[in-house]
Image (cartoon, rainbow, N blue to C red):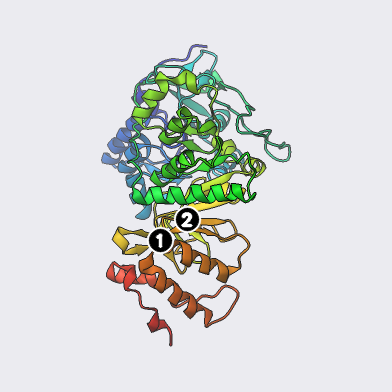
Amino acid sequence: MSIPFITAEEAASYIKNGDNVGFSGFTASGTPKVVTVALAKRAKELHEKGEPFKINLFTGASTNDHVDGELARADAIGIRTPYQSHPDSRKLSNKGGMHYFDTHLSHVSQDLRYGFYGDIDVAVIEATEMSPSGEIILGAGLGMAPTLAQIAKKVIIEYSSYYHTSFRGFHDNYVPLDPPHRREIPIYKPSDRIGSTVLKIDPAKIIGVVPSNASESIKPFTAPDEISQRIGDNISHFLGEQLRTGKMPKEFLPIQSGVGNVANAVLYGLGENPEIPQFEMYTEVIQDAVMHLMEEGHCKFASTCALTFSDEAMLHFMDNIDFFRDKILMRPGEISNHPEVVRRLGLIAMNTALEADIYGNVNSTHVLGTKMMNGIGGSADFSRNAYLSIFSCPSIQKGGKISAIVPMVSHVDHSEHSVKVIATEQGVADLRGKDPIQRAECIIENCVHPMYKELMWDYLKLAQKGGGHLPHNLKAAFALHETFMETGDMSQTDFARYDA
């Protein structure tokens, strides 16, 4: 059958108020870029007429300004999951303008197949190649595109001509069986291919094809600063020590790495450490750093869900794509983050924290316990099941007015049961085999900034007066947070007033 080309405005007209709409891609990579802009314009026009218009937005992970930005500014989002990182959608969520629920990235595809959130009325999927029979080649990110292609009632294809070379062969489209017929995910090393290079969509479901020539619009991260480099050095030296002492296989283990400057600094630190052998990655995104590490011979293979390259790096990748064809494989998010595979491969999981407490609990999502930053993403998919779970962050923020290590985190995303190692620029705390008081002593001694170290010791002594396996003084546990809200400076905290 013939699939028509249509305009972005025509495509947007098929999406109705209250529809559940799924989008391809993972981070900005592989997400739609023109249909959503037309949809936001339509929402504004309807709102000006006094007519309601909001969609329920389901994505693989975060998106870009074309999706979360445009739709948030148009007040066109009713429900949002599983992850967002755009300032406008963050603002909308924190003022209650949309119903954002945070969930693990590995769960969202199967939750949709299970029908937890209702049907997907329309899916918008970016393609870089397409046949009349509905076989498409995806772009720089998969997200949950294979599940959307399977369950959506209608599909809109955004056909991208931005990529001047073929992505054919880079994708591994695979949807696991659902219970009670589920089998193992047959991945035994990061390079194992288990699915198809093409995504098949029933042509009868495809409304039309919308041309697009927009880039991912990903800006390069700034070069690692001194603090990030010290964190990276601390982690790479710690992993080198694990190799020397036989606590890790001499062949090393696959790496999972989060997103951002600290994550990039850690990866560069691994590449610069002569003790670390050539390594593989099994992760959810790869950034510019991974491409450079591959070209330098440090990283030999990466399984990922998305190529989260800056626009400049993406152009370089496309110009040299044949070099990378046997070194990168893109999978759906529920496979790149699958707990079964993470446990089997024995990953070294490295993620970032907003704050951690002296007992090893980590807050990844909520500033001062209330304001959503981005979301939990895939960090728990990996950390809970990894061979070694490492969380890192600078020990202080805002010139020392905030300590990232506190007596009790204001929101818990990762409990002390899942966190094996905490690292800051001050040092590394190995929490394995330690009881709560030993963990606190290790974190205070190795990870807390000098300007907060005495305060943390004061709190621990105060808490221990009440006894217990995990000592806390509940009146003083959030004293640093309360002091910051009152004075703008956590270092002004005085625990003496709680020692009555």
- Mark 2: which secondary structure? strand
- Give the residue number, with chain letter if any, for mark 1: 404
Residue 140 spot, x, y in % from top left: 45, 28
Residue sticking out furthest to the bottom: 500
Which residue is painted at 40% across and 44% down in the image? Answer: 260
Amino acid type, callout 1:
Ala
Tell me the crowding category of disc 2: few under 14, some 14 to 19, or many 20 or more residues within 10 angstroms, Cα based.
many
Residue 407 spot, x, y in % from top left: 46, 69
Query: Going from the N terminus, do you reach mark 2 or mark 1 first?
Result: 1
Residue sticking out furthest to the left: 48
**Residue 347 visible in the displayed image:** yes
Which residue is painted at 62% across and 48% down in the image? Answer: 387
Q: Note whether 57 is above or below 315 in the view shown.
A: below
Find the distance from the CA under tag 2 to the CA under tag 1.
Answer: 11 Å
Tell me the crowding category of disc 1: few under 14, some 14 to 19, or many 20 or more residues within 10 angstroms, Cα based.
many
Residue 369 spot, x, y in % from top left: 42, 62
Which residue is painted at 57% across and 32% down in the image? Answer: 147
Q: Is residue 184 left or right of residue 370?
A: right
| Residue 85 occupies quadrant | top left
User: Can you tell which mark lies on residue 423?
Assistant: 2
**Foreground residue, 322 or 53?**
322
Quarter of the image for the C terminus: give it: bottom left
